[in-house]
Image (tube, grey):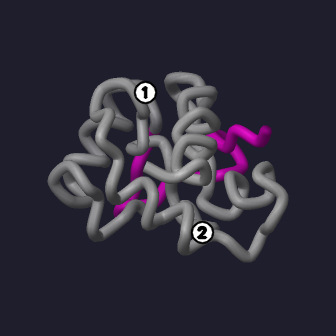
C-alpha cells in the first residue's frame, strides 16, 4: 500500500455517517485537486471494508460509483440509505449531504 492510499483511507474514515464527500474533495484535501482518479483507484482497492467507508464517496455530481468496489452502485445505495442518506436515481444531493474537510 502506498502512502497516498493510506492518506486517502484516513480522510475517508473522517466522513461521518449520513454524509458523503467527493473524489475531488479528497484530492483537494490531499493538496492536489487533479488527483481525483487516483483517489478513485485507491478506493477501488480499499482493503479495509467496514473500516474505511468508501461507500460515502461519490462523484462531483453526487452520482454513485458504477464500479463500487464492494458490489456495484446498488450496494453503495443500500449502504447510504441505511445511514439515512437519500439516494434518487443513483444520485445524492450534495447540497444536503456533502461533507467537506
For the point 21% across and 54% down, the residue is: 74
| Residue depicted at x 62% and y 40% | 97
Image quadrant in which you'd find residue 34: bottom right
Q: Residue furthest left?
A: 71
Q: Which residue is mark 2?
A: 61
Residue under label 1 = 84
Residue at 39 percent across and 44 percent down: it is 55
Residue 82 % position (x, y): 31, 27
Picture coordinates of residue 39, whole percent (x, y) = 55, 61
Q: Is residue 28 magenta?
A: no
Q: Is residue 76 left or right of residue 1?
A: left
Is 11 situated left or right of 47 in this image? right
Magenta region: 86-101
- Say which mark, if any, is on residue 18: none
Q: Earlier in the sequence, mark 1 or mark 2?
A: 2
Structural crowding at the residue carrying mark 1, measured as other residues with C-alpha within 10 Å and reported as few (<14), some (14–19) or many (≥20)? few
Whole-angstrom CA distance, mark 1 to mark 2, is 19 Å
Judged from the image, the secondary structure of the residue bearing numbered disc 2 is loop
User: What number of labels is visible?
Assistant: 2
Q: In the displayed orientation, state which residue is furthest to the right.
A: 31
The residue nearer to you, when weighing 24 against 8, is 8
* Other residues around mark 2 within 10 Å, as few (<14) / some (14–19) / many (≥20): few
The quadrant the C terminus occupies is top right
Q: Is residue 42 above or below residue 18?
A: below
Magenta stretch encompasses residue 98: yes
Taking the spot 40% from the left edge, 49% from the top edge, the residue there is 87
Q: Position of residue 78 (x, y in %)?
A: 25, 40
In the picture, measured across the screen, residue 32 lies left or right of residue 2, that is right
Amino acid at each position: 500500500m502506498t502512502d497516498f492510499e493510506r492518506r486517502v483511507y484516513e480522510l475517508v474514515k473522517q466522513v461521518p455517517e449520513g454524509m458523503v464527500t467527493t473524489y475531488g474533495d479528497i484530492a483537494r484535501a490531499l493538496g492536489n485537486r487533479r488527483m481525483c482518479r487516483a483517489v478513485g483507484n485507491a478506493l477501488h482497492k480499499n482493503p479495509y471494508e467496514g473500516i474505511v467507508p468508501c461507500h460515502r464517496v461519490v462523484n462531483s455530481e453526487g452520482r454513485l460509483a458504477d464500479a463500487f468496489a464492494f458490489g456495484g452502485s446498488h450496494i453503495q445505495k443500500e449502504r447510504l440509505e441505511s445511514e439515512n442518506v437519500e439516494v434518487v436515481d443513483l444520485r445524492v444531493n450534495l447540497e444536503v449531504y456533502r461533507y467537506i474537510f
